[in-house]
Structures are given as C-alpha cells and as structure tokens.
Image (spheres, helix red, strand yellow):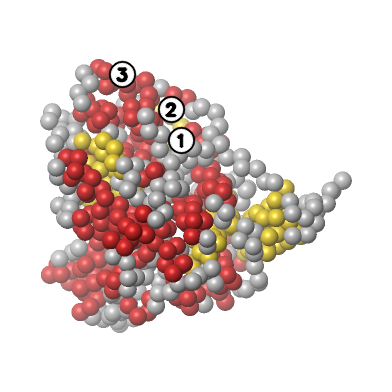
Amino acid sequence: MVVTIEQGRWVEIRSVVLHAGERAPQVPEDTRQVPLEMRARGFLARPARPGEEALITTLTGRQLSGTLVSVEPAYDHGFGTPVPELLDIAGEVRALLEDGGGDR
Amino acid sequence: MSAASYAEIMAQRLGILQRSTGLNYASYARGTIAFDYRGLFEDTGYDLETVQKVQSTTAVGNTPLVELHNITALARTIAPAGKGARIFVKDEAANPSGSFKDRRASLSIHAAGQAGYPGVVAATSGNYGAAVASQAAKAGLRCIVVQEAFDSEGIAQPEIAEKTRACEAYGAEVIRLSVGPELFYVFLRVLKETGYFNASLYTPYSIQGIETLGYELAQQVRAATGNFPDMVIATHAGGGNLTGTARGLRKAGATGTEVVAASVDLGGLHMASNRDFNRKSFTTGHTGFSLPFTTWPDRADVPRNAARPLRYMDRFVTVSQGEVFYITEVLAALEGMERGPAGNTSLAAAFALAQTLERDKVVVVQETEYTGAGKHPIAQLNLARQMGIDIRRGDPAENVPGECIVIPVHPAQIAARPVDLDQVRRSYLRNALETLPENGLLSEDDREFLAEETRIPPEQLEAVIDELQ
C-alpha cells in the first residue's frame, strides 16, 4: 500500500536535468550513457505519494518539483569499520621517536 | 526550476555572470589574450586592512600557528645529519565553519550584502559550500549550494555527503547533482532564476579574502622565530589558496619565502567520469583540478579567474593518497590533532621537504580543516574498498590512482614528487596561444601579460612561443 505523505514533511525529490542523449559534448563516454540527475530536499508543499510527482519548498523558500524519493532522508555517511591498514601507524611512529632518542 | 534548454542558458553565460558578480569583466580586456589583472583587484575597493575588519566581524581568521614538535622530531630521525626544518601548521580549522574557506566566503558575502543581493549561490562540493552557507547565515542572506554529489548508482562521495549536511545545518538549500560538467548549466539556471550573487571561488573577493591568511602567517612566524618562513606549502586545486596566500605573504614583506604547491596525484582518473567519481579518495586538492587550473585558469565559473597560481608558485609537488592517509594518522598520534585531508596533503609534502632543509629553517603548512564523519580516512578507505580498490601497506611509489592505495610502512617512504614547472609553463602557453584567432598576432600587452603569467623572462618568452608555434 502506498501511503500519502502529508504536507510539511521534510522529503527528497529527484529529477532528470539532462537525459543520456542530451549530455554536453565534452563528457566522457561512460558519463554520456547516464542522465544528469538532480536531488533536492525541502518541505512537501502539498500531499504526495512516493514515486509520484511532488512539489517542495526548499530552505531558501523556492519551490521545486520532482519525483518523491524519500521521507526524512538519512544523513548516513559516517566512518564505518576500523581500517586495519591504519591501526598500526600510531604505534610504529611512537616507537620510531623513542628509538630516535626523542631529538626535539 | 523552469525548463530552459542547455544551449539557451549557456548562450546567456556572460550576461548572467556579469549581473551575478557585479563585475564588468569585459572592461578589463587588453590585447587579445591579456587582461588587467591588477585592475580587477583594485576595483573591488577592499584593501588588506578593510578585509581584516570585515573578517573580524564574523570571527574569521586570526587562527593559531602551531609548531609540530613531534612530527619535526620524527622527520629528523630519518633526515640527513643537520637537516630537518621546523614544521608549523596554521590551524585554519579554527574558523567558524572549520576551514580557511571562511576567508574566501566572508568577502563575497560582504560584497553581496553591500550591493543588495537577496542571496548567494556557490557551485562547490567542498568546504567552500559550508563556508558560504555559514557566512550567509550570519549576514541574513539566503544561500544555495550546487554540488556534484553522487554517481549514477546514487552512491554519494562521503566527504560531499558531509558537506550536504553541513550546508543544510547552516540553512542553505543544497542542489545535489550526479557527475558531469553540466553542473555549470544548472548553476547558471539557478543564478538566472533567483537573481542571487555568484559567490564564485574565483572572483577577486574570494582571493582577497585569503590574503589575510598569508599576511597573518608571515607575522606569526616572525613573532615565533624571528624570521619570515623559509617555505610555505599550500594544498593546490583551483589555485585560489596558493594565489591568495602568496599575495598575503608579499603584502607582509615575506618576499623571500619559497611558495610550494602540493596536490594529491590522481593521474589517470577522469574528473568528468561517472565511473571514476567514487574511485577517488580525495574530492579536492588533487591533480585533477590543479594541473588544468594551473595551465589554464580561465576555465572557472567567472570569465576571468582571479586565482592565477602559476604567477605565484616557486615549486609544485605531488603526494599520493596513501601518504596523506598515513600523515593524517601521524598528526593525530603524535600531535593530538585530528584534521582533514586538505591541509594534510601539504603536511605530507612538508614532512618530505623539511628533510631537505637545515634544522634552523621553517616550513609552514598554511591550512588545516576539520574532519569527522565522511571526511576521515576510515570513511574514504571503506568506500575505496567497496569500489574494489586494493588497499595495502607497502611502498607508496606503487600507488595507482583508482586501482590501489598503498599506505607507507615507514615515514622515510613519504616523498614530495616534483612537477616540472617548465613543462607546466609550456602547457599554459600552448593553451593561451590556442585562444588566439586564426592568423591572430600577440600584442605588446599580450606579451607582457604572458611573461607575468608564466614568470618566463620577457627576453626568453619569444623563443619559447616560436618553438610552440
């Protein structure tokens, strides 16, 4: 069941700015084969359903339209798991300094 | 956004840029290639003292200069006898939004406010977006940031994702795009539709905002050591950081300081490639920007770029991604400072170059930036691994951008690899000569301009040009 998202919720919309066949002449082949996409976030200006056309009011007060792709989109960038290749560096350089006589 | 065709908007480029910067770029033309570089700066009406006043009202600048005693000591354990200069860093992370970019943004926002623009727009995926958003927030101006943010699979570069979050935290609207140079078209459309100010990284406002960095640095080093710095290393991408810092050093009287550009080597990766986009672990400060912008600055979002790094650099070096990750860990472990990739690119170079200088010399890394989620080596290396890039400890000389990241096993492996500046100057001249109309001739103004741009002595310039033609 697709639920209607009420007006005022913080959402993300997506739209295609240039289709694959419309890319600038200077772009490399792999980029030319995909569209130029835009994503923007704002408050839903009127109720809409995911996957359908939606209108948002952005943080500057502009109105933009596109396909509603997510509600309260996550900031999911982070750190991730520790990287083993980095874990030993601190111990190694401390040891080098101690062996080097701490010439400061 | 209203529908307007690509060709239609691109054809309006000059008009949109003139209206959105308030600068009449056409009026600076001299000869065919030349333009009045000094005049472009003089007409902003800001001198160094005024810039300092503007920046002090928003807590920008006056950042600490920190001597890295332990990293200097580490360099001395591997340097030849008597070598190992003192390494200092200008802790620009202390600026309000966490990087030196606040200096660049401050003057643009001040100028936009004075001229009555209701808001500002910036095309940037990096710290500059957060800086513009932060300064705009203080000035009560609206702000839109246009980013190149994700590939065709929707995978965001983690550092850019962090900038999206920061810009939104400062109240800016963020337009996120997939990979491609047509970002400029979207940027022009936004400028046209909103009537906002173009807070370009490449206007004279942006460069004058950085002059205070070089000026402060020179004074702080002299206060701490009795002399001006022997060498200042600037992480180099579009050229503004190096240009503004070098101009500030000169204004302070530090004319004998060697100015070094340092970039991460991303040779072989295409900057407009959707595939390569997430195979880079650095979003800026790399050769994908620095080589094109050094050899032809006028490829930016303004008709004439005020950042002209070839005029100011004495030396240009590259370091590898693995070396920067390594020195980032060292900075945290030995100096208790967790900082981001931008300044650490220069720090990797400084670590190598300090070993070539006497112990009483002073090398300064002229910026740090904040780090954290998305910007940290852990985040970048996890993405690299997800993209199939081989990550290992070993000899960083084996590093291949986009294929493997080799993290040194010993600090003695860190190297600052020279870029041949004579070749860079020739590339610049080749690009300049390509802009001449067919059978077009260089005027006296053009020759003088090209000599200043390349620092090739005027009496030698003719021979080099003849050879290239």
Disc 3 + disc 1, Cβ < 8 Å: no
* Residue A86, disc: 2
Q: Distance between the residues labelled 2 and 3?
A: 16 Å
Disc 1 + disc 2, Cβ < 8 Å: yes
Crowding around mark 2 (Cα neighbors within 10 Å: few <14, some 14 to 19, many 20+) is some
Q: In the displayed structure, does residue B26 sit left or right of residue A39?
A: left
Q: In this view, does B414 lie above or below B119?
A: above
* Residue B377, disc: 1
Residue at (20% x, 23% y) in the render: A103
Percent across and percent down for residue A83 are 49, 28
Query: What amino acid type should be assigned to the residue bearing mark 2?
Result: Leu
**Chain at numbered mark 2:** A
Residue B213 in sight = yes
Q: Is residue B66 above or below residue A3?
A: above
Q: In this view, does B373 lie above or below A67?
A: above
Q: Distance between the residues labelled 3 and 1?
A: 22 Å
* Residue A95, disc: 3
**Chain at numbered mark 1:** B
Residue at (26% x, 71% y) in the render: B38
